[in-house]
Image (cartoon, grey):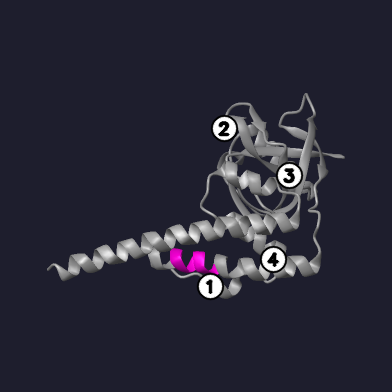
């Protein structure tokens, strides 16, 4: 168990995923300055109750550590930072009397990370993630570099968790999952549902467009 500065947010951070923040509250300016100068991570937690700015917040107990990779100093001691998620952790308590929230935490590595099982699960998940991105690209007329999808199963799983357009509470449920095989299976269920819905919506929209043009 160790002490970890905590940053409660209205977002869920996953290992390996990026996070951009504008730091302007005094308590977080102090925290981020210290973390950056000491090369220390901080913990990102989804807010369970409370406010992100200007008040107290109760965090969910499972979060993700973040390492600052870029910092831009601004007027008034503010910062823009880029951080990257590293490891899951669990909060066992909060240290009182600190200028910002400090948790007593332990790392929470995934269990059941059998390489052969994960490779098989990732191979099944990958085409669903690919199809999801293809549909989004078609709907928004943007391009995704699908060759950049990672081959490593857990990196793919956390990228898939990051990409899903679902409420933060559901993303927290994904972060809470401690079994690697279960995480990939749960993601496959999410993506099958989302791809089916998006395919149906896209087909309906295309049919309506054809009907509009054919009636003219």
Judge the density around disc 3: few (<14), some (14-19), many (≥20) Cα neighbours within 10 Å.
Answer: many
Q: CA distance from mark 3 to mark 1?
A: 31 Å
Q: Number of marks in the image?
A: 4
- Mark on residue 42? 3
Asked if the residue at tag 1 contacts the one at tag 3, i.e. Cβ–Cβ closer than 8 Å, the answer is no
Asked if the residue at tag 2 contacts the one at tag 1, i.e. Cβ–Cβ closer than 8 Å, the answer is no
Against 182, residue 96 (above or below) is above
Q: Residue furthest right?
A: 1
Give the labeled residue for mark 2. Answer: 53
Q: CA distance from mark 1 to mark 2?
A: 35 Å
The structure residue drawn at horizontal position 54% and vertical position 69%, both measured from the top left corner, is 130
Query: What's the magenta region?
Result: 130-136
Q: Does residue 17 appear anywhere in the picture? A: no
The structure residue drawn at horizontal position 40% and vertical position 68%, both measured from the top left corner, is 138
The quadrant of the picture occupied by the N terminus is top right
- Of marks 1 and 2, which one's residue comes earlier in the chain? 2
Give the labeled residue for mark 4. Answer: 121
Name the foreground residue: 169 vs 32. Answer: 169
Q: CA distance from mark 4 to mark 3?
A: 31 Å
**In this image, 166 relative to 15: left or right?**
left
- Of marks 4 and 2, which one's residue comes earlier in the chain? 2
- Of marks 4 and 3, which one's residue comes earlier in the chain? 3
Give the labeled residue for mark 1. Answer: 145
Q: Position of residue 186 (x, y in %)?
A: 64, 54
The quadrant of the picture occupied by the C terminus is bottom left
Name the element at disc 1: loop
Q: Please name which of the two marks, 1 or 2, marks the residue nearer to the observer.
A: 1
Q: Residue furthest left?
A: 216
């Amino acid at each position: 168990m160790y002490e970890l500065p905590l940053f409660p947010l209205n977002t869920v951070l996953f290992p390996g995923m990026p996070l951009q923040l504008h730091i302007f509250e005094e308590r977080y300016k102090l925290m981020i300055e210290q973390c950056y100068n000491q090369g220390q991570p901080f913990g990102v937690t989804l807010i369970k109750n409370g406010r992100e700015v200007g008040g107290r917040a109760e965090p969910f107990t499972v979060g993700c550590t973040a390492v600052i990779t870029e910092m831009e100093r601004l007027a008034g001691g503010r910062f823009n930072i880029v951080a990257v998620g590293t490891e899951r952790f669990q909060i066992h308590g909060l240290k009182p009397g600190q200028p910002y929230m400090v948790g007593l935490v332990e790392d929470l590595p995934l269990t059941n990370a059998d390489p052969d099982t994960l490779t098989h699960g990732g191979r099944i998940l990958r085409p669903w993630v690919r199809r999801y991105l293809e549909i989004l690209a078609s709907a928004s007329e943007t391009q995704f570099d699908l060759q950049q999808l990672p081959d490593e199963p857990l990196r793919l799983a956390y990228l898939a968790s990051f990409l899903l357009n679902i409420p933060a509470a559901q993303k927290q449920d994904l972060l809470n999952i401690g079994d690697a095989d279960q995480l990939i299976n749960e993601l496959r269920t999410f993506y099958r549902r989302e791809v089916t819905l998006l395919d149906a919506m896209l087909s309906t929209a295309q049919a309506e467009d054809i009907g509009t043009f054919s009636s003219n």
